[in-house]
Image (tube, rainbow, N blue to C red):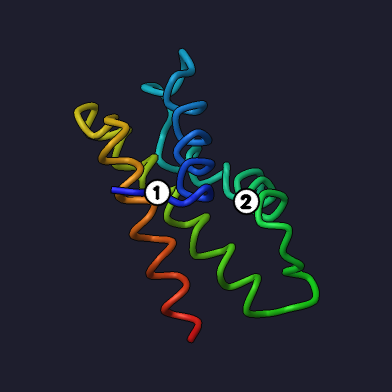
Amino acid sequence: MKFSPLAVHCASLCFDVIQSNSFKELSHCEIEQFYEDIYGLIQQRTALWPEHHQREHEFIDSVTCGVLKALHICRDKPQARDAEWLLSALESRIDFSIKQLH
């Protein structure tokens, strides 16, 4: 399967978090606290202007929530920390986010 550059970027963000020594000790509340950082990184990567365009905010928000969901799953299920699964899940979320806005 071919993955979009944004899916690769989001998977990389996830692996940066997952590979930290403290990941397995993070609570789900602590994972949720990554929202603003992840949102900002996705906004930078996409070069969108969410402060000026509501649809762009909704897209970035949806993708950010997808990244957080993937982190929650990886926290609970170490077997989910597979690159193929993570890329597929994030690509699906990106596709969903695009379709949701049309």
Q: Which residue is located at x 43 percent, y 80 percent?
A: 100
Question: In the picture shown, does residue 71 fall above or below 52?
Answer: above
Nearest the eye: 36 or 91: 91
Residue at 23% over, 34% down: 80
Q: Which mark is residue 42?
A: 2
Q: CA distance from mark 2 to mark 1?
A: 16 Å
At horizontal 56% and vertical 64% (from top left) the residue drawn is 61
Query: Which residue is painted at 52% across and 47% down in the image?
Result: 5
| Residue 87, image x, y percentages | 35, 43
Q: Which residue is mark 1?
A: 3
Q: Observer-nearest residue: 92 or 34?
A: 92
Amino acid beneath label 2: Ile
Residue 60 place in picture, x, y as percent: 59, 63
Q: Say what secondary structure mark 2 lies in.
A: helix
Q: Relative to residue 82, is residue 22 drawn left or right?
A: right
Q: Which residue type carries mark 1?
A: Phe
